[in-house]
Image: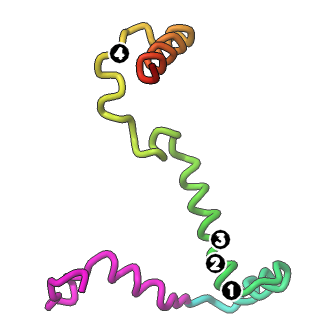
C-alpha cells in the first residue's frame, strides 16, 4: 500500500484521490441550445464528446499559457543563474564569450 495513512474525514483527501475521482466521471448540465450546438459540432468534427471536450480543454489551457512569459511557463528563473555573473552580460557578444568559456572549461 503506497499511502499507509488512513483518511477518516472525507475532507482529508489527497490530490491523487481527487484526480482519480475526476477521471472516473465528468457530468455537465447544458441547456437545450448549447446541447444542439454541441451536437452540431460533434457532427461536423466527426468525433465523440469525450475527445471534443479533451481538445477544447487543451486549447483553452494553451491560450491561458500563452498569456504567461516563457520564464513563467518554465517555472521562473533559476535562483543561482546570475548570482556571480558579470554586469555586462546583457550584451550578446559578452554572453556568447561567457558561454564559450564555460563550455570550454567544462569539457576539457
Whether pointer 1 and pointer 4 mark residues with C-beta atoms closer than 8 Å, the reply is no
Give the residue at the far front of this rendering.
108
Q: Which mark is residue 53?
A: 2
**Which residue is denoted by mark 3 in the rendering?**
56
Which residue is denoted by mark 1 in the rendering? 49
Between discs 2 and 4, the one toward the N terminus: 2
- Relative placement, left or right, of 8 versus 29 is left
> On the rendered structure, is 4 left or right of 85?
left
| Residue at image location 55% in from the left, 88% down from the top | 28
Residue 67 location, x and y as percent? 55, 47
Would you place residue 73 above or below residue 104 in this image? below
Q: Which mark is residue 85?
A: 4
Instruction: State which tag comes first along the sequence, 1 or 4.
Output: 1
Please give the range of residues in magenta.
1-28
Circle 1/circle 2 CB separation < 8 Å:
yes
Q: Distance between the residues labelled 1 and 2?
A: 6 Å
Quarter holding the C terminus is top left
Depicted 42 relative to depicted 101: above or below: below
Rounded to the nearest angstrom, the CA distance separating label 2 from label 3 is 5 Å
Q: Is residue 53 magenta?
A: no
> In terms of secondary structure, what is the magenta stretch mainly?
loop
* Label 2 – label 4 distance at C-alpha: 47 Å
Disc number lying in front (1 or 4)? 4
Would you call the spot at circle 1 few (<14 residues within 10 Å), some (14-19), or many (20 or more)? few
Classify mark 3: helix, strand or loop. helix
Closer to the camera in the image, 26 or 96:
96
Amino acid at each position: 500500500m503506497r499511502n499507509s495513512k488512513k483518511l477518516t474525514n472525507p475532507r482529508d483527501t489527497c490530490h491523487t484521490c481527487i484526480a482519480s475521482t475526476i477521471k472516473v466521471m465528468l457530468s455537465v448540465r447544458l441547456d437545450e441550445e448549447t446541447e444542439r450546438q454541441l451536437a452540431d459540432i460533434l457532427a461536423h468534427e466527426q468525433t465523440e464528446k469525450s475527445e471534443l471536450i479533451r481538445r477544447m480543454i487543451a486549447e483553452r489551457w494553451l491560450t491561458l499559457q500563452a498569456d504567461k512569459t516563457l520564464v513563467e511557463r518554465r517555472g521562473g528563473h533559476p535562483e543561482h543563474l546570475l548570482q556571480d555573473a558579470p554586469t555586462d552580460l546583457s550584451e550578446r557578444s559578452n554572453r556568447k564569450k561567457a558561454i564559450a568559456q564555460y563550455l570550454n572549461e567544462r569539457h576539457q
